[in-house]
């Protein structure tokens, strides 16, 4: 019996080999366009958050410019990232977007080695001749979402599931808290760290811990919808992040600060094709449209829509700035003097290692 | 029961090879179903896997770089397995070796390069060996189960490195991001013909291990203990001492892998430093039947699988999980074929007939 099995396998193998040699030669051929764009993702392309937002941008780019793009998902923020970038270059990519903070140094290293390839790193601060960085002023919609949370909370305790103690996350927590306190000075924001960008189990655990401490609105700086679902299971409310996800937790979800990367990707790649590209530091805000606040659902508190619209207009026309003084830190020390406004580089820089008053949580400092 | 399992005695070497080859093709055949469901042509995907591993100088280099840790770790594991000491702890030993080497790389980068690299290698070997020694002493003294013990030690090592990365060793220059600083150039292994020197270390170790197992007294003793501890004792061997020194070597070699990976591949210590090599090497060691030269072959094939898997993910935009499914499928079938090499299934009817004829 086994002889038969083996012989039939051998026959199949031979057929396979024939077919293989027949069609193997044309594999790997692609469109003859000048650019081949590669994306390195930190999570799965369909994570329901950060990476999915980038992937939507990638698909938008493919559609708008009719070009071929590649992606590699779930790349850890370690040396594996450098490998993934090199793999992409070996596969013919000449434009590479790396879309997580921890990819920065690896992107820089490879960029120096390949001056003819264009690199883009999202959410960092380094750049070079062929190495641009880009991000958005996410603290603007964070502030707006804080208004929604501050109006909604009855317990006056809001939970914030946060990834890492880096400026990007810290300024988001601060902006959110300033938004909360602008409408509800009695509310506090409790922070729990997950030390991962995407891990739905850890995100859920953090959310549950916050709910156990009495929070009745949960928001997040993490990439999955797990915190929103945890809030819904307790019958309380949630604000998402990255993507508009009203379906994940329909009874809890109020809104989310969201990303819209597509137009930026199209602009940059188009400039490369046209030969007009120059390295840049891009950080658009509500006005430019790279970020937004998702439409408020029916769960959102009454009056929030109007309040958000009012503040949004002020942010867009420049009459209001989220980080305008006076701003006090947790200990009550003035960090931003009255009449002063923090610059983008200060908001995103190493100096952003303190929480505003109203945040309950700790930033671990490395020595 | 429709079938009965009978131990095989009649299989020749060529037949065994045929079984394994057939298993690989069956795996590819089964994986094809997944690939077709995803809307891709399986032949193109497989061809592309080979293209990713051999199609360019870059691909070949990457495949070799992935082969190196598998070979060295497998050699380490093989020493323990030869004694039937089931060392599942290579992963942890790699971590601890990498940790020890990193200590010198991060704190003593001012030592001249050759000396620093030798110190790092020695530290990696020693600490990896000591890490393996803990379960070995417990086994020798109290007869604890080394399989579970070594496995649990992996998690301790992983969490230790995680603690360092998120805590005391966190790079202050990384803006709060949990990473350990990159090594100074002095702490990075040099390249020979475009690939880090680890490939030479691997080849030298293969030769040493082959000679050690087959042509030295200690190698012979290890084999005897593996066959029967009582025989070894009767022959006057100091079983405890042999177990302990051999495990020191086994863990030490795995620790050396850690040093090589941290220095040459990652240029730092990170929780991803092992890349799962410690577990994968258990499989390669076993499939190679503990033979040093065969370990090279099997490790290389596995590296092709890993490198090719990474390549098809981007080339065909198939999810990472599917690339893993193909790898898992091949593993499943190849390991499954080992069963059919050892045993055969027989229809129960024929057994009954034979028994009837025999008049039982």
Image (cartoon, coloured by chain):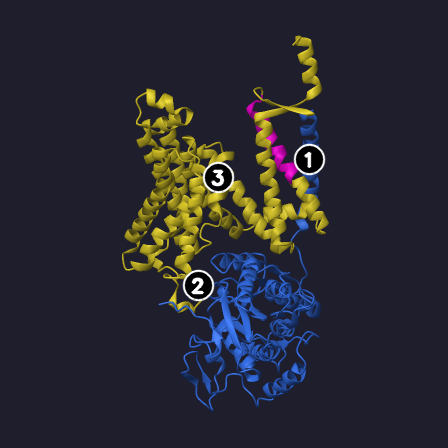
| Residue B193 in sight | no
Pinpoint residue A321: horizontal percent, then vertical percent. 54, 86
Q: Are marks 2 and 3 in contact (CB under 8 Å)?
A: no
As drawn, the chain in blue is A
Pinpoint residue B281: horizontal percent, then vertical percent. 48, 41
Pinpoint residue A254: horizontal percent, then vertical percent. 65, 73
- Numbered label attached to residue B282: 3
Which type of secondary structure does the marked residue at label 2 adopt?
A: loop
Which type of secondary structure does the marked residue at label 1 adopt?
A: helix
Q: Are marks 3 and 1 on the same chain?
A: no
Label the magenta part by its dominant secondary structure.
helix
Q: Earlier in the sequence, mark 2 or mark 3?
A: 2
Q: Residue at x 38, y 49 (%)?
A: B96
Locate the C terminus of chain B and report the quarter of the image it occupies.
Answer: top right
Chain letter of the residue carrying label 2: B
Camera-side residue of B322 and A201:
A201
Q: How far apart are the two marked residues, 2 and 1, measured between alpha carbons?
A: 51 Å
Query: Eyeballing the image, is B283 above or below A53?
Result: above
Whether A76 is among the magenta residues is no
As drawn, the chain in yellow is B
Camera-side residue of B297 and A312:
A312
Residue underneath mark 1: A14
Residue underneath mark 2: B178
Specify start and end residues of the magenta stretch as a single range: B11-27
């Amino acid at each position: 019996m086994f002889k038969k099995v083996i012989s039939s396998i051998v026959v199949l193998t031979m057929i396979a080999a024939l077919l293989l040699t027949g069609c193997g030669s044309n594999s790997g051929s692609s469109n003859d366009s000048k650019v081949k764009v590669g994306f390195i993702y930190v999570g799965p392309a369909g994570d329901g958050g950060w990476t999915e937002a980038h992937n939507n941008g990638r698909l938008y780019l493919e559609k708008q410019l009719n070009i071929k793009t590649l992606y590699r998902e779930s790349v850890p923020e370690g040396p594996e990232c450098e490998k993934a970038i090199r793999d992409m270059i070996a596969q013919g990519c000449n434009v590479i977007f790396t879309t997580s903070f921890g990819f920065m140094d690896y992107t820089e290293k490879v960029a120096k080695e390949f001056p003819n390839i264009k690199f883009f790193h999202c959410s960092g601060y380094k750049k070079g001749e062929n190495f641009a960085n880009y991000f958005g002023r996410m603290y603007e919609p964070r502030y707006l979402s804080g208004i929604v949370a501050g109006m909604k909370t009855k317990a006056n305790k809001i939970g914030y599931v946060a990834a890492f103690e880096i400026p990007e996350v810290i300024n988001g927590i601060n902006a959110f808290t300033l938004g909360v306190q602008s409408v509800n000075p009695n509310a506090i924001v409790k922070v729990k760290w997950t030390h991962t960008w995407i891990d739905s189990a850890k995100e859920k655990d953090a959310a549950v811990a916050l709910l156990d401490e009495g929070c009745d609105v949960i928001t997040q700086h993490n990439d999955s919808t797990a915190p929103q679902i945890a809030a819904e299971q307790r019958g309380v409310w949630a604000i998402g992040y990255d993507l508009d996800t009203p379906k994940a937790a329909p009874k809890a979800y109020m809104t989310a600060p969201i990303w819209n990367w597509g137009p930026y990707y199209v602009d940059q790649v188009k400039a490369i094709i046209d030969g007009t590209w120059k390295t840049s530091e891009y950080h658009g805000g509500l006005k430019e449209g790279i970020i937004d606040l998702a439409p408020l659902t029916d769960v959102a508190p009454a009056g929030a829509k109007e309040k958000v619209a009012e503040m949004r207009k002020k942010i867009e026309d420049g009459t209001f700035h989220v980080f305008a003084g006076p701003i006090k830190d947790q200990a009550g020390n003035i960090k931003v003097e009255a009449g002063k406004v923090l610059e983008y580089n200060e908001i995103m820089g190493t100096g952003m290692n303190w929480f505003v008053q109203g945040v309950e949580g700790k930033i671990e400092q490395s020595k | 029961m429709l079938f009965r399992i009978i131990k095989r005695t009649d299989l020749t070497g060529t037949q065994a090879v045929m079984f394994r080859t057939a298993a690989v093709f069956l795996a590819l055949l089964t994986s094809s179903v997944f690939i077709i469901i995803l809307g891709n042509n399986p032949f193109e995907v497989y061809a592309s896997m080979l293209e990713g591993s051999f199609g360019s100088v870059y691909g070949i280099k990457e495949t070799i770089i992935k082969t190196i840790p598998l070979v060295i770790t497998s050699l380490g594991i093989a020493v323990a397995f030869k004694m039937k000491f089931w060392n599942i702890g290579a992963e942890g030993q790699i971590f601890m070796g990498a940790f020890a080497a990193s200590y010198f790389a991060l704190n003593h980068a001012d030592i001249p390069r050759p000396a620093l690299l030798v110190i790092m290698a020695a530290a990696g070997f020693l600490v990896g060996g000591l890490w393996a020694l803990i379960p070995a002493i417990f086994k020798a003294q109290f007869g604890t189960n080394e399989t579970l013990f070594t496995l649990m030690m992996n998690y301790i090592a992983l969490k230790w490195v995680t603690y360092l990365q998120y805590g005391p060793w966190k790079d202050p220059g990384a803006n709060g991001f949990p990473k350990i600083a990159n090594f100074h150039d002095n702490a990075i292994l040099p390249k020979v013909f475009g690939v880090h020197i680890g490939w030479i270390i691997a080849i030298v170790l293969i030769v040493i291990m082959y000679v050690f197992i087959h042509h030295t007294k200690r190698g012979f003793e290890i084999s005897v203990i593996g066959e029967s501890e009582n025989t070894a004792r009767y022959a006057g061997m100091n079983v405890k001492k042999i177990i302990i020194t051999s495990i020191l070597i086994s863990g030490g070699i795995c620790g050396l892998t850690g040093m090589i990976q941290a220095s040459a591949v990652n240029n730092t210590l990170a929780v991803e430093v092992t890349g799962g090599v410690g577990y994968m090497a258990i499989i390669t060691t076993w499939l190679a039947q503990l033979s040093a030269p065969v370990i090279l072959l099997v490790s290389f094939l596995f590296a092709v699988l890993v490198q090719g898997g990474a390549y098809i993910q981007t080339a065909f935009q198939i999810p990472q999980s599917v690339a893993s499914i193909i790898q898992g499928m091949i593993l499943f079938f190849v390991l499954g074929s080992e069963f059919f090499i050892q045993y055969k299934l027989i229809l129960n009817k024929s057994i009954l007939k034979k028994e009837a004829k025999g008049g039982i």
